[in-house]
């Protein structure tokens, strides 16, 4: 089959992607710093833990759940 190589391939033509010299891998220069040191509980306002790990909220949630069960 002689004409086979001249037929265009289906789909987008694959272009060779040239990397620029200034292109750097993502995440090297702009590192996201996670702030773990200053969490505040949005429930009671205590610093050092968040609402999910708040003992007061858990207690109130348990009481609320018990109240809901009684109804
Ligand atoms: Zn709390």
Image (cartoon, helix red, strand yellow):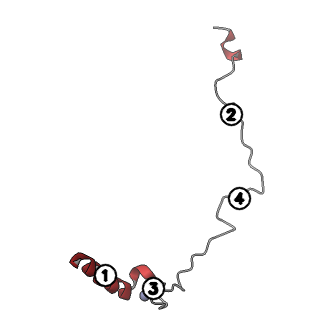
* 2 left or right, relative to 69: right
Give the percent coordinates (x, y) of residue 57. 38, 84
70 in relation to 56, above or below: above
For marks 2 and 3, the one nearer the N-term is 2
Disc 2 to disc 1, how far (Cα)?
Answer: 61 Å
For marks 2 and 4, the one nearer the N-term is 2
Disc 1 to disc 4, how far (Cα)?
Answer: 53 Å
Of tags 2 and 4, which is closer to the observer? 2
For marks 2 and 1, the one nearer the N-term is 2
Q: State whether label 3 is within 8 Å of ligand 1.
A: yes
Q: Which residue is mark 2?
A: 14
Residue at the spot 69% in from the left edge and 20% down from the top edge: 8
Query: Quick one: SS at disc 3?
Result: loop
Disc 2 to disc 4, how far (Cα)?
Answer: 23 Å
Query: Quick one: SS at disc 4?
Result: loop
In the rendered image, which quarter contains the N terminus? top right
């Amino acid at each position: 089959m002689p004409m086979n190589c001249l037929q265009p391939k289906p789909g987008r033509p694959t272009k060779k992607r040239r990397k620029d010299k200034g292109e750097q891998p993502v995440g090297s220069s702009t590192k996201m710093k996670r702030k773990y040191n200053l969490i505040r509980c949005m429930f009671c306002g205590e610093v050092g833990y968040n609402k999910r790990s708040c003992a007061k909220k858990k207690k109130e949630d348990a009481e609320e759940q018990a109240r809901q069960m009684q109804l």
